[in-house]
Amino acid sequence: MEDNPASVPRRGIYLVANRRSETESNNLIASIRRCGCRLPIRVIPFDDTPAVLDKRWDEVESLSMGDFPAEGLAFFRELTERHRGCHPGLLRRFLCWFGEFDEFLYSDNDVVALMNWEELFPWLENYDVVHADTEYTTGGRFNLREPRKFEDLMGSGSLEAALTSGHFLCRRSPKHPADLLAGLSWMEAHRDLLIWQDQVLLHVTLLVAKWRVLNLCKPPYNWASSWAGDYKDVLELVRTIQVERRTISHMHYSGRIGTGLRPIDELIYSSLTIPERNRRLLGTLLRQAVGIEAAQRQIDRVRRKIEQLAGRSQ
């Protein structure tokens, strides 16, 4: 992007999806449009099974890897070769820095929009990255093996700089790809401190490169948490918005879609017809009742541990 203050930035939204996640992706697109956002939406393929997108909505397009420039593909190849503890599909979000938009919002599929996301972009005027989540309250336990040692190296407050890579806005700069690779180099030099995932790369990069970052969930703005696990039911969500008068930009399920554990999981199926929505919810409740969900969580934990160990040994 040219550093021309008089230019009008091209703004848009990126998702990454495949056939497996297309229901959640289409539900997300429906929630974005139903909340009034008319920005163009581009869907990056997670793998070789592209999602089939709902044709009801304008300015929604599937991309292919060939839609990105050579320098973007070269960056992605280097990233996947060096960041081997993370599935390549998860790293495709970093292709957003080589797309058509000067300012972009990236979102995971396990998200439901709760406001017009066009209203978020003015916050980027003085920042590289804007987000609204409470990852900073976790003390680094989901991203770091040794949080305190990480803070000793990065400086006071570095743990509170954490963000969720599943939903953020960026005012991209030509230097950002090099910054991301510098962040990756720091990770390689301190491999044993980290859990190797895409989210950690963003956290490390913004500290190493000193990106200007705004988290709207922190004071003085105090937006409500966007993590679904902070709300026990839909009434709690409504109470937060109506009674506490706190802004909330979206609801993020953080990979735990349709477990039947949270009543607000029904939002993830809000774009479906009533019979299909009921069928999906019944299926998730049955899986929960017979213990399939508990078994799947254990399998997921083992898989993540194997991936983390593999990343640590490289």
Image: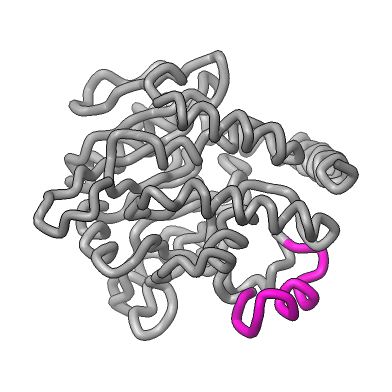
Question: Relative to 187, is 95 on the left or the right?
Answer: left
Residue 171 visible? The answer is: yes
State the image coordinates of residue 33 (x, y, percent, origin top left). Answer: 23, 39
Front-most of residues 123 and 114: 123
- Which residue is at a point 61% across and 45% down the rendered structure image? 256
Question: Relative to 300, is 90 on the left or the right?
Answer: left
Number of marks present in the image shown: 0
- Which residue is at a point 61% across and 29% down the rendered structure image? 77
State the image coordinates of residue 48 (x, y, percent, origin top left). Answer: 56, 14
Q: What residue span does the magenta drawing correspond to?
A: 144-158
Front-most of residues 153 and 261: 153
Q: Is residue 174 magenta?
A: no
Name the colour scheme: one colour
- Which residue is at a point 50% across and 27% down the rendered structure image? 73
Front-most of residues 219 and 171: 171
Quadrant housing the C terminus: top right
Please determine whether, in this image, residue 19 is positioned above or below residue 34: above
Question: Relative to 197, is 11 on the left or the right?
Answer: left
Q: Which quadrant holds residue 192? A: bottom right
